[in-house]
Every structure is written in C-alpha cells, then in structure tokens.
Amino acid sequence: MWREIKTIIKNNNRFLLTTHIHPDGDGIGAACALTELLIKMNKQVKFVCDSPIPHKYAFLDFHNTHFTYSDTENYDDTEVLVILDTNKLDRIGRLSNLATNPNVKIICIDHHPIESIEFTPYYVVDPTACSVGAMVYALLKEFGFPLDLEAAKGIYTSVICDTGRFSYASTNRKAHKIADECIRIGVDPDEMYSNIFQHISIAEIKIFAKALQRMEIYLDNQIVIQEIRKEDYANLDVELVDIEHIDLEYFLEFNKLIEDVKCVVLLREIGEKNIRVSIRTKANLDISPIIESLGGGGHKNAAGVTWNGTIQEIKEIIIEKLKNLLTISQKKTQKINEEEMLNSFT
C-alpha cells in the first residue's frame, strides 16, 4: 500500500505538507507527525495551511514555523506536495495551484471514502483508519523509524480528536494501541487534554448561550438544530475571522448528550448567504450521503458543508432529509427486531 509513497519520499528532498482549510486536530496532528519523520530523513519540509491554525494547536509547532500560508513566500520550489485528511483539491485553498505544476508530485493520504483520486496517482485512502494520524503512524512504521515524543504528540492529537476522545464509531483497537504507544513514549494525556479541549473563550460561551436559546427540536426529540447568526457576534470582543474558525465540537457534543437525540445540526452564518453546516449523529446513523448530496463531505457520524443561501433555506432542506433518513433507519431497525423475534421461536 505504501510502496510508491515510500519511493517518492526517498527520491525527493523538498516537501510541502498541507491539510484542508478550516483545519482540525486530525490534519494538523498528522502533518506535524509527518514533518518529524521527514526531518529525520534529512528532508526540507514545511507544513502550511491556507487557513489560520486554531491557537490551541500551537504547542505542536515544534520548529516555530507558524503553519500559515503567506502570499510573500514562494512555494514553487516544492518537489512533493503532501495532502492530508482530504481528497479534494478545492479543500486546500491556494495551494491547489501547485497541482498544475508538472514538476510537483502530489501525495494524498486520507481516510474519507472515495473510489479513486483523479489529480494524482500517488495516494493511500483507508476508510477503516480512525484518523489520518493513524495512517502517518503506519507510514512511520513502514520506514522503520522509532516514534519520538514530538511525532507521538502529533499522532496522539490526531487520534484523540478524530475519535471524539475515543467515543466515535471510528474508535477501534488500533486507536487505543497507538495511543498506548504514544503514552509509553512520554505523551501526557492530561496535558494533551488541557491543550486541546480546555480552551473555550468567554466569547464562545456567550455565543453558545445564544445558540441554545434558539434550539429547535424535531421528530420526537431525535433532531436538534441550533443557529449562530452574525448578530450574535455583536458587542463581543471577537472578530468574524475568529468565529469562522471557532471549534464547534463543544457545541455539537453538548447536544449529543440529550438522551433521545439522534442528529445534532449547527447552522453558522458566516456572511451574506454563506452558511456553514455541521452535523453529528449517534451510533450507526450515516449522515455522509446527505452531506455529499449537498456538495460537502466528512464521515459517517460527522460531516459538514458550506451552503450558499439563507439559514432558513438550508434548515428546511436538512430537516426534510434527516426525517427521511430517520424513517428509513427506524424501518430497518424494526425489520431486524422482527426477524430476531421470529428466529427466537425457530
């Protein structure tokens, strides 16, 4: 699986790593871990993202590079562009321009399901991986390098973020095995938890309070929808650009605590007819087909899309699609229960 990727890495020297815009802990952690691997191989490497990196991940900037795309920096000398945690060029922003450079080889490492990737022949996609960091861990093992503390912090960040602190359906034995090795090397779980998850600002809490006041519940408490509107940012000591990159997991996970809830939806107004939609589901309820039908992406239980329209428009569409999804899911469950009951009498 990794043979061609390893050959490209061995035969080239200048690497540029990136992840999707509005980056999360998985892409950031994986990129930081891969940076450490390439440095060990005496490669020139930069990790750059065409979106601000949330401040809480600054502890992973081991080489003081700041990670952020710069208009004044020249990336044309790149030999290999490595794309992590997305398989779509339009999700890496301005760095996608490098894809038109015939001298740049592109490697894609991702765990979002896709049949093939058209913009490069050099890719590894593993939908069974709990995170892209777990895939970078596998690549590191392929090269035979021991896991050092810096790389372990990146991989642990990736795993703990994309498994929802080991609570999502993507959590598997390998996720715990990787975390165990990171801890044995010296990663402190308490310190990591504090760095990643205990950074909610007062402004975020106030916005969250407004969103709670707008909570709407549908289909016998199975669907919860909340809205964050532009006016919610008024009178707060916070810029819109900061709100764009706010960590929504706190908002979404809080609502998943409600007993009967199956789907949690957060609609965030970023600009005029620019709505960011984030959906989380419980258990085996697969939200990805709905989001993909709207032009977005993600995983089975966590996905999102940017909608060019009003909050009311996308809310009506989402409600209708979720009602259909839940109805189908309930019918399947009922059929399985009936079959199990019949089997119990045979």
Image (cartoon, helix red, strand yellow):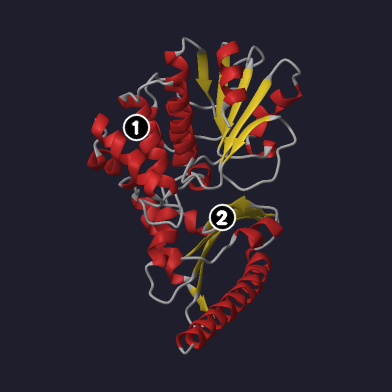
First in sequence: mark 1 or mark 2? Answer: 1
The residue indicated by pointer 2 is 303
Residue 176 in the image: state x and y as whole percent.
Answer: 34, 45
With respect to residue 305, does 49 lie above or below? above
With respect to residue 194, does 144 lie above or below? above
Look at 67% across and 69% down and name the residue there. 317
- Packing grade of label 1 (10 A; few <14, some 14-19, many >=20) is many
The picture quadrant where one finds residue 33 is top left
Name the side, left or right, on which 34 lies relative to 69. left
Look at 51% across and 88% down and name the residue there. 342
Element at label 2? strand
- The circle on residue 153 is 1
Q: Amino acid at mark 2?
A: Ala
Q: Quadrant of the N terminus?
A: top right
- The circle on residue 193 is none
Residue 269 in the image: state x and y as whole percent.
Answer: 58, 56
With respect to residue 76, does 116 lie above or below? below
Residue 53 can be seen, yes or no: no
The picture quadrant where one finds residue 81 is top right
- The residues bearing labels 1 and 2 have C-alpha atoms spaced at a distance of 25 Å
Residue 175 in the image: state x and y as whole percent.
Answer: 39, 45
Residue 16 can be seen, yes or no: yes
With respect to residue 307, does 6 lie above or below? above
